[in-house]
Image: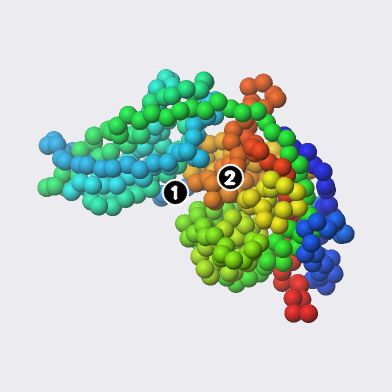
Amino acid sequence: MYIIITSVLTAALFLAIGIGTYMVLFSDIIDDPTKEDEVERGFTDQTFMRVPKSEDIIVGRYDTPPMSTAVVTSGYSYSLAWSFMMNDIWVDYGSMVSVEYTNTGSNQVFVEKFGIAAEWMTDPTRAEATVGFYVDPGDSVDLGTLYFWGPNRAGNYTYLIQVYIHAQQSIGNRWREYGWNSNDQMHWEALDLREEDDYDIVENTAYYYDIINEKINPFSPNVKDFALGATMDYSGEYSVFQLCALYDHLRETINYTLDPEGEGENVWYSPDQTIAQCGGDCEDHAMLLAASVMTLGGTARIYLTDNERNNPNPNHAFAAIYIGSNATREDVIESLKVYYNTDLKGAWFHDQWGNWLIADPLNSPILGGMPLGCEPVRTEEAGVVSWDFQQLESLVVIDVVGIGPFLDTTS
């Protein structure tokens, strides 16, 4: 639950007006975080807010299983590594688990499925995803991220991480299907849900608005190369799959790094600087992601969490991507399920413009997961589970319009 206390949403997008007018509207840089707003800024209408195209099929991602013709048993061994979203499982919500498979044997292995089986799961008895990876001896493969449902009450439960495998014989190139294999039984505590919290929402405050938007240049060749390189497998019209590929690429290539010691307040790196150094902290990740979304043709925002008002050093920053009405939001969520090969519970904000999909690469392994500092909550509506921040004073919302190219920073 939140309370909107400031709304300043009347400046124009750079695509909507001429460059000369744009320079006049956004040339006022205010450095004092406590100074009151003097101009209205941000999005003005939905004319240039593009919704990404939804897609429902991916061709050629996984290999097909080998034919099982071997009669003689072949040897195999493996190890599994996995992690839960935010290291927790919640009642009535569940969690997500990411699994990595390592072939520690001497024969090639084919992984057909992976899943989790827990004592609260009865019908079905396992949450699973079908994949398709050949894994050579000594190699590892990321099987993906799997959403699974939670128990209906808090407590300590047992669970198994499982893989469905085929193994190749050492001689004769024949395969044998071994089916489901499990790790040792593990224990995990399922947490009860908290109630919704109250906090303020502050929109487009001058201090953050100017810092962020003067750093973002959606026309930067470096940002363009980053965005197009990430999405080369999904070229064409601006789409959900492009956003997923961009999100995954950023997670894989941009490291989390702390600001240099002795700098005092936060150092805000431009997307070009973040790309060059292959790293940055949370606001640098958020600005690069937002700039890349703009380069692809989309609309983005950046959210800043504060434990105190007018704080020049926010606790966390993350991006969100415009996905339109409730109807188009549901289409986007279905496309996310296809891309990530799992059922999932998406996370988004809703306001007067429509819906904004959460994009926090420092907290969620998939696009549309909860941002850092959040967890599932019970809502006032009976039986409905959502998500919310915990112990938050205010949430600052910044519309990203990318005024950097139009500012004269030399005077």
Left or right: residue 360 compared with residue 58:
right
Label number found at residue 362: none
Q: In what element is the residue under mark 2?
A: loop
From the top left corner, tell me how far across and down residue 169 is, in percent: 16, 44
The residue nearer to you, when weighing 296 against 77, is 77
Asked which colour scheme the image uses, the reply is rainbow
Left or right: residue 281 compared with residue 116:
right
Badge 1 is on which residue? 59
Earlier in the chain: of badge 1 and badge 2, it is 1
Residue found at the very far bottom of the displayed protein: 411
From the top left corner, tell me how far across and down residue 49 is, in percent: 73, 53
Q: Residue sitting at 64 percent across and 63 percent down?
A: 264
Q: In what element is the residue under mark 1?
A: loop
Find residue 83 and report its image quarter: top left
Q: Residue sitting at 83 percent across and 48 percent down?
A: 7
Q: Residue sitting at 14 percent across and 47 percent down?
A: 170
Indicate the amino acid at tag 1: Val
Badge 2 is on which residue? 372
Res 124 seen here: no
From the top left corner, tell me how far across and down residue 375 is, in percent: 59, 36
Indicate the amino acid at tag 2: Leu
Q: Residues within 10 Å of mark 1 (few under 14, many from 20)?
A: few
The quadrant in which the C terminus is found is bottom right
Q: Is residue 372 shown above or below 246?
A: above
Q: Residue sitting at 76 percent across and 44 percent down?
A: 201
From the top left corner, tell me how far across and down residue 215 is, in percent: 68, 66
Q: Is residue 315 shown above or below 391?
A: below
